[in-house]
Image (tube, coloured by chain):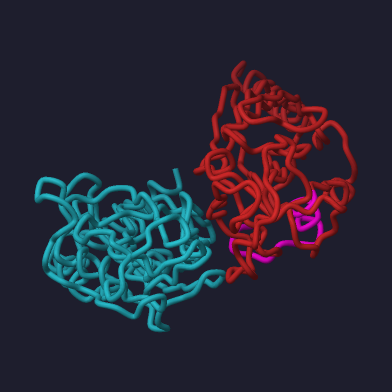
Chain colours: A cyan, B red
Amino acid sequence: MHTKFVKKTVNCLVGVSLAASLSACMHDDDDDENMQSMNYQVEVYNLTSGQPLTPLAAILHKPGYAPWMLGASASVGMETIAESGDSSTLISEAESNMNYITSMTSSNGPFLPGSSESVTVTSENSDDLHLSLVSMLANTNDAFTGISNLNLENLEKGEKISLYMSAYDAGTEKNTESLGTLPGPADNGEGFNSTRDEYSSSEDYVSIHRGAVTVDDGLSSSVLNETHRWNGPVAKLVVTRLQ
Amino acid sequence: MKLKPIKSLFAASLLFNAGILSAQAASWQVDVTNLTHGIHFTPLLVTAHGASTHLFQSGMEASTDIKAMAECGDTSALITALGGADDDTIDNPAAGLLAPGASTMTTITTTNNYLSLVAMMLPTNDGFVGMDAMMIPSDAGTYTFYLNSYDAGSEANDELMDTSGCAPGMSGIPGAPGEDVGTGGSGVASEDSNLMIHIHRGVLGDSNPAGGSSDLDNTIHRWQNPVAKVVVTVTP
């Protein structure tokens, strides 16, 4: 009941501002509270053993935008962040989508296993509000973690959503783990390369990652060791509505 | 004229029912299945509790009590902190180890809404299966959860057997119930780089029972998440 009332009031205010007229709606102090923007703290815990996570790219949007889809070819923006950690192309792609609202990237550089990173994103309106988030596993060829289209619409002030995030394979670069191909500290190698050589072009798609093989498990050309492996979830996401 | 008394009677009966409901304990049948192929769970701790209780939280440092559970399979300090075993804190429902592929069942009677579960995984250094404060609906029904394996972050995953006794902080794997481990390994990993409770990366093992880097077997002791299935049947 209360939620419906608030929504109606907000719609009314939007209508007023669009029509540039006060005649359609009566104002009072309660309405002004509803104009306050909503702040969401987006916090990510790195739960891997040996994979730094690159700076968070958090995007608020309405349904209809998705940074990636399982089984579909990765965009150039997703390819870029999954191979290098650079989210700028992904953000540009999102900004050009009609469902984009706002975005925020964390500014402290990669964050290590056992640490966490957070950003705060702000929206004027919670209607149809969704969050997407992407971060690269730095000691990999093209693995990333994140969330696509998390619904925040019904998150009340003070409430939080907590969930585990998987590792995905962007499908844009072979998982050679070899010298010069991994941008993270295990290699300090190459980041983004526009060549798509994961497999044949028909297998250029995003999937759940199979994990790192590493030199300790028989891939002699790998610069990774057993500490760089993971097993299922790689990070915990906690979204808290602050305001 | 007749409406008023009927209304007030109705309101009174609602309040009466609400009072009964809030005091009435629900019954949860909890079934736990070990989904691994070569890992035993040490005696389980299964507990119902309120919203502010956590046995552990991923991304946070392991408590002393959690280290005792994860490194040695000892849940006694955790159980003491929960006020001892009772209707909603169940100690060791499987009456011992829960073998790979095996299931156990227990019943919790509780007015609480959250369920947690922990047990050490053997043979590992400080790996454990865990459920951290899962909210259980009050509606009658059957609810299924899959659990991950965690690394307590408190002991190096050297994958070397040491059955000479166990204490938190000591290196080595304290036991291998399957008796399918080797000896003479040189040690897989030194200190953990992630000192918080995190998702276990799994064990490596090797194919040399009398040497190599690990005392574990790479065809027996590996696993992928999830490692356990929990089915909760709620009877209000």
Is residue A2 placed above or below B136 in the rendered structure?
Answer: below
How many numbered tags mark residues here?
A: 0
Spot the residue most to the front. B210
Image coords of residue A174 (percent x, y): 23, 59
Q: Residue at x 41, y 75 (%)?
A: A186
Is residue A85 placed above or below B130 in the rendered structure?
Answer: below
Q: Residue at x 63, y 23 (%)?
A: B233
Q: Is residue B104 left or right of residue A4?
A: right
Q: Is residue B44 left or right of residue A39?
A: right
Residue B47 in sight: no
Which quadrant would the N terminus of chain B be assigned to in this image? top right
Which quadrant would the C terminus of chain B be assigned to in this image? top right
Image coords of residue A13 (percent x, y): 27, 62
Give the image quarter of residue B98.
top right
Residue B204 in sight: yes
Give the image quarter of residue A218.
bottom left
Q: Is residue A236 left or right of residue B42?
A: left
Q: Residue at x 63, y 46 (%)?
A: B209
In this view, the residue in front, B195 or A5, is B195
Q: Is residue B121 magenta?
A: no
Q: Which residues are magenta?
A: B56-72
Image coords of residue B178 (percent x, y): 70, 34
